[in-house]
Amino acid sequence: MEQKGTLTVKRGLAQMLKGGVIMDVVTPEQAVIAQEAGAVAVMALERIPADIRAAGGVARMSNLELIRSIMDAVTIPVMAKVRIGHIGEAQVLQALGVDFIDESEVLTPADDKFHLAKNDYTTPFVCGARDLGEALRRIAEGAAMIRSKGEAGSGNIVEAVRHMRAIGDGIRELTVAPKEELVARARDLGAPLDLVTYVAENGKLPVVLFCAGGVSTPADASLMMQLGAEGIFVGSGIFKSNDPKAFSQAIVAATTHYDDPKAVVEASLSLGRDATAMEGIDLRRIPESELLASRGA
Amino acid sequence: MAPKPQVGVLALQGDVEEHLAALERAGARGVAVKNRAALDACEALVIPGGESTTVIRLLDRFALAEPLRERVRAGMPLWGTCMGMIVVARAVAGLDQPTLGLLDVTVRRNAFGRQNDSAEVELAIPALGEPAFPAIFIRAPWIESAGATVELLASYGEHGVMVRQGNVLGTSFHPELTADPRVHRYFLGMLAP
C-alpha cells in the first residue's frame, strides 16, 4: 500500500529542488540566513570547503550534534556529506534522518576503489561527476541526483564549466549516435547500457543535474544554468563573501532569472558597492595532490 | 476543434518541466510563468512542487503575489501541488510563514516526516473514479483544518490530501511525477467552458 524509499521518491526530492540554490552552512544561524534568503536546501558541514582545503588533513562526516541542530533550525531539506565509500557514515546519516546524503570528494575518500551501493538506502544520494561516464556510473550505483564536481572551495568556476560542458557534450553525442553504436559507447563510457540507451533516447540524465564547485557570484549562477545545470550548489561562495545575506539573495534571484540578463544585473546591483565575492584561487597554483575533483571516478 | 487552453506553471523554482509535460499530455498548452506578462497571458495556473519558503519570497521579490491574487479572485483556476498548496493556503500550522491565503485551509508542512518517510501510495479519489491514483508524497504537507466551503476530495489516513474550494485546487502529492493524467484533466475541467 505504502512504499517508502523508492527510486521515484528519491529522484523526486531532487526534482523539487530544481531551479533552486543549495547552500553550505556550518551553524544553525547560517542555515536560517540561507533559508530566509530563499535557499531550497542547506548542506550541513563543520567547515566549508575553502576551510577544509586550508586545514588539510583528513576531512570526515560532520559532527552529528551540529547536523541535528541545523535540522532543527530550518524547515527546508538538510543534506550532509559522507566520505566516498564510507558505509558506516552513510548508515549513520540515514538513521539520523537527513534528507539527502552527498557522497562527496570534498571529504577524504574512505574507499579508494568503490563508491557506496546507494540503492540500498532509503535516503537519496547526490554524487559529483566530471563527465557523462562518471555521472552514469554514480546513477547505476543509485545516486538520485548528480552535480558537477567543479573544484570545491576554490572560488574558481573553470572546473565546473569544464565538467558541465563535458556532461552536456556526452549527452548530445549519444542522442545522435546510431543505435548499433550504443553497446560500444557504453563500454567506452564505462556505464551500463540501459542508462546509455536512456540518455540516447531522452537527451538528458534520468536524474536531476546541478552545478557545484566554484560558484561565487550571481553571474556564475547564470552561466552554469545556461550550460544546462538545473540548479546550483554554493559552498564557500556565500559565507566567504563579505555579505552572506546579500550574496545568497542575489544568487537565488540570478538562478531563477538566469536567462534574463537584466534580472541578473538587478541581482548583482543589490549587492551594493562594497560587495566582495570570496577570494578565488588560480587552479594551476594548487598542487595536483590537493585537487579534490580527481577523487573517486 | 477548440483551441488548447493555455495553462501557466509558476516557474520561480520547482518541478516546472514535469508539470508542463503533464499538461501537454492532458490536452493543454503549458507555459512557464516567471513574470507578469506571462501570468496575464494564461487562463489557469499551476504552482508546482518545490520549496515553499523559497517561492513565497520570490513571489514578493518579483512583485507577482498581488497580480496572482487578483487573477485568482477574479476566477482564474489555480492548482497548488505540495509546495504549491502551502503557498496558496490560508495558514501554515505551527509556523509563522507568509502565504497567499487563496485556499481556506491550514496546512501542516512536512506532516508525514522527513524525506525517509516520503512514499508512493495508492490513493482513492472518488471524483476520479477507479482505479486508485498513484499518489507520490515527498516531504508532503497535509490539511490540518479547512473552512466550511472547502470540498474534501481525498484523504490519506486521518488527513485531507486533496481539496477544492471553487476555482482553487490543492494536492499534497505530485500527479506530475506519474503518467496518470487524471488530476491534470480534472484541473483543466475547472476552466469555464
Image (cartoon, coloured by chain):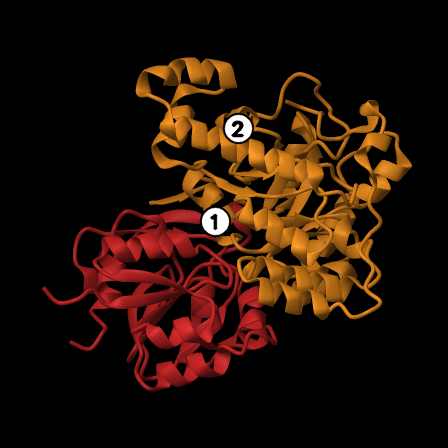
Chain colours: A orange, B red
Label 2 and label 1 in one chain: yes
Residue B16 seen by the camera: yes
State how far apart marks 2 and 1 are (Cα). 19 Å
Amino acid at pointer 2: Leu
Q: Chain of mark 1?
A: A
Q: Residue at label 2?
A: A132
Whole-percent x, y for residue A240 in the image: 82, 53
Residues packed near mark 1 inside 10 Å, few (<14), some (14 to 19) or many (20 plus): many
Work out whether mark 2 precedes mark 1 in sequence or the reverse, and give the earlier one: 1
Residues packed near mark 2 inside 10 Å, few (<14), some (14 to 19) or many (20 plus): many
The residue drawn where x is 43% and y is 79% is: B68
Q: How many marks?
A: 2
Whole-percent x, y for residue B28 in the image: 24, 61
Horizontal side of A75 relative to B150 (left or right) equals: right
Q: Residue at label 1?
A: A15
Of labels 2 and 1, the one closer to you: 2
